[in-house]
Image (cartoon, rainbow, N blue to C red):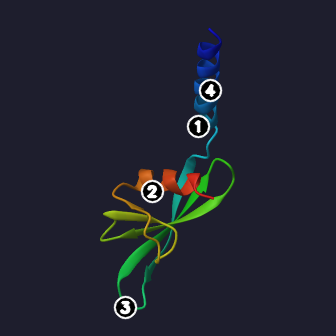
Amino acid sequence: MKLIKIAAFTALAVASASSFAAKPRSIVFDANKETADGTAYAAYVVKCSDGSDKALTAWDNRKKWCVGDATSEECEKKQIKAAKKACKMD
């Protein structure tokens, strides 16, 4: 019985922690830019629920979304997935 209580408490604690994680509140276009070799990309700013601002970049006519600046390799196919990942990062 004690093991069941511990397992239930642990599951509840994990669920609670994930519900308090920062989430994207808005995604705002910043500017069109180019890398040193001439590759065009768009820069965005994600405003997170914890008050922080994170950078997103869009590549290949907004088919690839990356967290951070032009050198980032943390990329997703969907804007919202990249924004969620950005808000979870420190």
Q: Kindly identify the residue that appears in the image at 57 percent across and 46 percent down.
A: 23
Mark 3 nearby-residue class (10 Å; few <14, some 14–19, many ≥20):
few
Q: Amino acid at mark 2?
A: Ala
C-alpha separation, residue under disc 3 versus residue under disc 1: 40 Å
Instruction: Identify whether 24 is placed above or below 44.
Output: above
Q: Position of residue 55 (x, y in %)?
A: 55, 66
Pointer 2 residue: 82
For mark 3, what is the residue?
A: 37
Upstream in sequence: badge 3 or badge 4:
4
The relative height of residue 30 versus residue 33 in the rendered view (above or below) is above
User: How far apart are the two marked residues, 4 and 2, measured between alpha carbons?
Assistant: 28 Å
Could you tell me which secondary element the residue under label 4 belongs to? helix
Indicate which disc, 3 or 1, sits on the residue closer to the N terminus: 1
Q: Disc 3 or disc 4, which is closer to the eye?
A: 4
Please name whichever residue, 46 or 11, is drawn nearer the observer in this view of the structure.
11
SS state under label 2: helix
- Write the residue at 51% across / 74% down: 69
Task: Sort mark 1 into few (<14), some (14-19) or many (20+) by Cα contacts within 10 Å.
Answer: few
Q: Secondary structure at mark 1?
A: helix
Q: CA distance from mark 3 to mark 2?
A: 24 Å
Q: Are marks 2 and 1 in contact (CB under 8 Å)?
A: no
| Disc on res. 77 | none
Amino acid type, mark 4: Thr
Q: Residues within 10 Å of mark 2 (few under 14, many from 20)?
A: many
Q: Which residue is mark 4?
A: 10
**Which residue is nearer to you in this view: 27 or 22?**
22
The residue labelled by disc 1 is 18
- Indicate the amino acid at tag 1: Ser
